Structures are given as structure tokens and as C-alpha cells.
Image (cartoon, coloured by chain):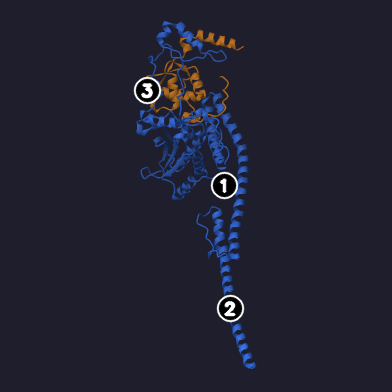
Chain colours: A orange, B blue
Amino acid sequence: MSPPRRRDREALVRPYLITGGRAHPTRNTLDLTTLIQATRHADPSLLSPEQRRTLRLCSGGSLSIAEIAAHLELPASVTRVMVADLVDQGHLATLSTEWQQHGPDRELLQEVLDGLRALR
Amino acid sequence: MVRSVGAAGLTALAVAGAAAIARQRQRIVELVREREQYLAELEHLRTKRLPALAESLNGMSTAPVPGPLRQADGTAVSESLAELVDGIERVVRATREHTEQASRRTLTGVLDTVRGLAAEQHMAVSDMQHRHDDADVLADLYTIDHAGSQLSRRLRGFAVLFGAWIGQQRSATSLQDILRGAQSQIRDYQRISVSANNPSTEGESVGDLGVITRVVEPLVLLVAELLDNAARYSPPYAQVAVGVQPAHNGVAITIDDAGVGMPLEERRRAERLLSKQEVALDEIGDPPRVGFAVVGLLAARYGMTVSVDAPPLYGGMRAVVFVPNELLTHIETPEESPVRESAASESADSGEGEAARSRQRTPGGLPKRSRRRRETTTEQTEAAPRDSSDSAAGLAAWQQASESSSAVPAGENEDEDTHA
């Protein structure tokens, strides 16, 4: 896992509130690299702000749990619980893992490699 | 002749003597009466006025302190009595003031030490939640985090009472997050249902309405104290409903519980504390009950209004917090539109898609990955209309009004003094 980002203050809305106090996701098939995409049919008006942001993030394509967590600045384990709920409610769908379907994305790996070299 | 003259002289002398004696007797009677009056005045002072003065100075009674039995008649005695009473009052007030200030300074110092440690611990728990990706660990961290949030709320409440700094400043925050932040900080947070949807405008969101930097923490604390009270005075299975309503020149935050209501005595105490501009340390009570005192002080300091009553319709209590327009601001919905590549353009002209993607780099040169389109197992979704433009038509007017009246952008309030 990446080292935690140093935040200068605690979030106002606490993680336990975001998941209603639940620490265990309703499904254990979600790992950090699971790709998530928004589905079309659901009505987001009753969702929490974090859930709505997740839907917006995933509405144009797929994002992994780790990426959603980074965008929302939430712990991955908390994001997992929230995403599992959204999948249960039909707002989000999981895509089978890219690595399994297509193997590693060469293009992305090259970009990461280039980036890492540029860091030196 | 001589004899008659002598007799006449004697007679005159006797008459004069008798008159003098009569005058002196009269004088003695007067003096005795005055003495009795003064004694009665002193007795009145000792048994009635001083005890009443003591009660009034200790805040135990609001009844007026009785005056002297007789109006001041300009004599030295009545003046010195009046001065004596004034003097006692001055000395007692000065002593109380001095003690109060000294106690506040000591308590603030103690509080600062504890708050520093509590904040450090809370931050550590926050970081641990980011570091550990394990549901069992998370469950334990939730417990610690929740306790930490409540502790932090209590400490900020005491800070308000002691006249100390309320705590960290936050950037302008949406009302919904204010309410949820407050919800995070009470024990029974799961019984609170926050709806930022406004019932009178058919479920349309007030999500982009927020408060300016200066009042974020005060309003969170104020609402948290009211929520805590509502949860405390309602049965453990009942929900506490929180809503936001547009109001004339501002918004009203409503907190409804389904309890049995507060006992009359408690309500009187609440009303008294809510109307106070200042709360003395000895009014906090033992064990300390600070909720309404904190709410009243914060409302007075930051220009909000709070009322608590028991509308017959509900059976429980309703607390209403009025937040005026000058404390409100417009919150931009976080922009979440990483380049949206349509499936068509990516397949037809992958070079352009590639270029667009490679433009997105972090300052360190690492590629910044946004979402990508893939062959998916679900149906392809079209770009959903962004919901940031769906602000309620019914609310637009008063939101605009609030924006124009609080023309200061949120950022400009950043450096404002929050010392309360």
C-alpha cells in the first residue's frame, strides 16, 4: 500500500458516519484493483455526497477502488464498504479484473516506468 | 415690691424651665424613635437586604434586592448605610470577577494541554484508518475514532465556556457536511437522519449552500450539542430528524425528536441559558451540563438564533437554528470530470486519446490516470448529465439573495479571527 497522505486536519465527516458504522463490506470480492463503473438506471437523489461523488467519478468509465479512495481522500477499506453498498443498490457494477481479462496494460506500465525514471 | 418682682421672676423661671424640660422630653422621644428606626433599619439590613444581595450576587435569585425601610432622609446615618451596602456589593463583585477570570485562565491552560493531546491522538487514528486495509482493524478504529470525535466536541464546548479559542478553522463547508459533521460527534449518531432535501421544494437539494469559514466550527458544535440533547431526551429506538428550510433572510436548521419532551424545569433552564450572552463558571453545574450554555454562547457570538420548543404536533421537541444570509455562501460542487473520452474517439483516433492522456501528469512527472473506457461486461453508459446544475429552481432565488448579500467570497474569510 502507498504510505498514507499526511493531512493537516481530520475530516469533518468521519469515516464511520459515511458507512453508517459498518466496517465490513457486504461482499468480499472487491479488492483495490477491482474496476468499478456506474450503471445508468439508478436515481442518485437519496445518496450521500460521497456516494454521489463516486457515481460521478465512475460515470464516464471505470475506476479502481484504490483510485476512487484517492479521489475521495477516504481510506480504502471505507471506500470498499461504500462501493459494495452502491453495487448492491445497482448504482455501480464491477468489471472483471483487467489483469485477468487483458493481462497487464503495457502502455500504462511504460508510462509509470517513464514517470519513475523522470523522478530521479 | 421686691417680693412681687422676685415672685414674678421665679414664676418666669419656672415657666421657662418647664418649657425647656418639655422640649428636652420631646427631643428624647424623637431620639428614641430615631434610634429605634435605625435599629430596625440595621435589623432589616442584616436579615433581609444582605441575604437578598448575596443571593442576587450568586445568581441564585433574580428577585430585586429590597431597599431601606425608610427613604433616605439625607442624614449622615442613612447615607453611610447606603454607602455601606454599595461598598459590600462592589467588593463582592470585584472579588467574584477576579476569581472568575483566574479560574478561566487556569482552566483554559489545562484545556489547551488536553486538547493538544486529544488532537494528536485523533489524527493518529485518522492516519491508521488510511494505513490499514483490513475490515476488522477498521471496526476497532471506528470505535476509537468515534470516542475521539466526542471527546473533541466536549473539549471545544468547554473552550467556548471558558472564552478560549474554539479550535481549528475550516474552509467554507456545505450545510449538509456541517450537519453530518455534527452528527459524527455525538454518541447516538446512528439515530440521526439528516436530510438536506427540502420538503417544501420537492426533494431538491440545498447541497451547494454552505457557511463561511468563520462559522463552520461554531455551527458544527452548536448543531452537535442540539443533536446530543435531542438524542438524549428521546427513546433509544426513535430517530432524530434534521432538516434545512429556507427562511426569510437565511436558512433554518430544524432538529426534531420524538421524545417525551423536556421536563418544564429543564426547559426553563434551557431557555435561560439560550438567551445568555455570558455564562459564569458556577452556572455550569456539577456534574457539568454545558450543552445549552454552549449553544447560547455560540449563537450570540456568531449572530445566529436558536429556539427550542415543544410544538403540539410532534410530541417531542423541536430546535430551530436560524443562520442569517451574511453567514451563508455558495459551495462549488467538487469538479469531477477527468477527461471524458468517448468510445468512438478513442477507437477512431487513439493517437489523440493518447495525447490527451499523456498531458495529464503530476508535478513529479508521473502519469495521472483518469478513467478509461474498456470493453465492459455491463452496458456502455452514456455520459450522465452532471448533477451540479440541478440546483432547485425554488431555492435559486434565496440562494442568489444569500450570495449577493454575502458578497465576500469564502476565501476572503480565511484569515478572520476565530478567537471567540
Q: Pick the quarter of the image with the N terminus of chain B.
A: bottom right
Mark 1 or mark 2, which has the lower sequence index? 2
- The lab-note entry on whether marks 3 and 2 share a chain reads no
Disc 3 element: loop
* Number of residues whose C-alpha sits closer than 10 Å to that of mark 3, classed few (under 14), some (14–19) or many (20 or more): few
- The lab-note entry on whether marks 1 and 2 share a chain reads yes
Circle 1 sits on which residue? B281
The amino acid type, in three-letter code, at marker 2 is Arg
Q: Tell me residue B215's x, y (percent).
A: 50, 34
Q: Tell me residue B12's x, y (percent).
A: 60, 86
Answer above or below: position of B97 versus B176: below
Disc 1 element: helix
Circle 2 sits on which residue? B23
The residue sitting at 56% across, 12% down in the picture is: B365
Q: Pick the quarter of the image with the C terminus of chain B.
A: top right
* Number of residues whose C-alpha sits closer than 10 Å to that of mark 1, classed few (under 14), some (14–19) or many (20 or more): some
Please name whichever residue, B161 or B371, is drawn nearer the observer in this view of the structure. Answer: B161
Q: Nearer the viewer, mark 1 or mark 2?
A: 2
The amino acid type, in three-letter code, at marker 3 is Ala
The residue sitting at 36% across, 45% down in the picture is: B312
* Count of residue discs: 3
- The lab-note entry on whether marks 3 and 1 share a chain reads no
Of all chains, the one bearing label 3 is: A
Q: Tell me residue B86's x, y (percent).
A: 59, 57
Q: Is residue A25 visible?
A: no
Q: Distance of mark 3 from mark 2, alpha carbons?
A: 108 Å
Please name whichever residue, B221 or B173, is drawn nearer the observer in this view of the structure. Answer: B173
Of all chains, the one bearing label 2 is: B
Answer above or below: position of B114 versus B266: above
Circle 3 sits on which residue? A42
